[in-house]
Image (cartoon, rainbow, N blue to C red):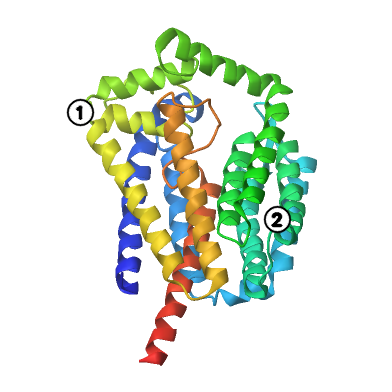
Amino acid sequence: MEIWRKKIGLLIIMLIFTAYSIIFVYSSSFPTAIRTYHNPYRFILMQVIWYAISYVAFFFVSGIDYKKYITKRNTIYLLGFILLVAVLVVGKRVNGSRRWIGIGPLTFAPAEFAKLCFIVYFSTMLAKFKKMGTKNLAILFPAFIVAVIYIGLIFLEKDFGTIAVLGGTILIMLFFTNIQIKYFVGIVILAIGASIPAIVLSAHRISRVISFFEGVKNNGVGGGYQVQQSIIGIGHGGLFGLGIGNGIQKYYYLPELHTDFIFSVIGEEGGYVLALILIIAFIVFFYIGIKIALDSKDWFAKYFVSGYFVMVILQALMNMMVATGMMPATGRPLPFISYGGTSVFILFLGLGIVFNILKQEEKREAIKS
């Protein structure tokens, strides 16, 4: 696939994501916005502003040579670390978790930025190991140390959903290094083993797991009240949906509609058709990303691009599976679609780095020709 096709493809997908977000954030949020702020446009105005800022940031970052991040890798890792510590000290506690730092009327989720910082740093580390021919435990030990610091801090925030996304991304990135299968299987077993007590020792997490399996037993699909209402909404929409703005679940039947359960609104109002189009868009987005990683001649680029797109698709998959009762609730928003400025902004920063990688590839090809 030619580089220009990859760029055009990603830009089209970005516009599709933007359209979905603006339409369905407004449709899902205006009842809550009226009740809470007496302004039906409260959430959608903030989302539009964040999208505008994110597009500007995307074009700015796409003009920065990605190799500068390699030379600044330690600073980037330290920045993520500082933000994760800061949220534990001065962060706002919401629903039992300390995940946000308040800046005036705005809130900032440091874990979202830290994920991108980690992928940048981890990609430089794995690229260095690849060039040196490092194998097995010589990769795993340093990888474990840098990963457990971030994951430990996020664990203290009580943000298990982010741990699942970041942990899954780390494992998949490690899979493509010089690690023998037996070592990789061992680290996967260790990760699963570590997650069990983290779930069991938390009353909130274990209640979600129990609720999920009770739902499977009683209704054939997992989840408690929220998930059941989500499935009712999607089923109510049928093939073509009830029409944009005509959904019922947003009228206080289903909480967190504009964030964690926006996929339910898409299914209810847009039907299976619009839901399927969005799923296909994510699949194409991921396919283009993997093609970029495979075609790149630079090991950092390979690892960063694969890590970024794996992170996005894992989170999208988790969100959709929760909304359809296929896994316990995780509190993960739908990437690019759900309401939330920090998430959108950081995702666009990552895409800016991806586009610069494509620009550098184009320059190298032009020099060769």
Q: Position of residue 134 (x, y in %)?
A: 69, 67
Q: Earlier in the sequence, mark 1 or mark 2?
A: 2
Residue 157 is drawn in which quadrant?
top right
**Residue 64 in sight here:** yes
Furthest-right residue in view?
A: 89
Picture disc at residue 239: 1
**Residue 158 in sight here:** no
Left or right for 241, reference 349: left
Compared with 135, 198 (above or below) is: above
**Is disc 2 placed on a helix, strand or loop?**
helix
Picture disc at residue 307: none
Left or right for 45, reference 189: left
For disc 2, the neighbor class at 10 Å (few under 14, some 14 to 19, many from 20) is many
Q: Position of residue 362 (x, y in %)?
A: 40, 80
Q: Nearer the viewer, residue 259 or 331?
A: 331
Compared with 357, 170 (above or below) is: above
Report the number of discs: 2
Q: Which residue corresponds to the image point at 47% horizontal and 66% vertical from the top-left? A: 354
Compared with 44, 97 (above or below) is: above
Q: Quadrant of the C terminus?
A: bottom left
Q: Quadrant of the N terminus?
A: bottom left
Q: Nearer the viewer, residue 100 or 119?
A: 119
Type of residue at label 2?
Answer: Gly
Report the residue marked by disc 2. 80
Alpha-carbon span between mark 1 and mark 2: 44 Å
Residue 143 is drawn in which quadrant?
bottom right
Q: Position of residue 244 (x, y in %)?
A: 26, 33
Q: Nearer the viewer, residue 338 or 224?
A: 224
Q: Which residue corresponds to the image point at 50% horizontal and 54% vertical from the top-left? A: 347
Type of residue at label 1?
Answer: Leu
Q: Nearer the viewer, residue 368 or 103?
A: 368
Q: Position of residue 313 (x, y in %)?
A: 45, 47
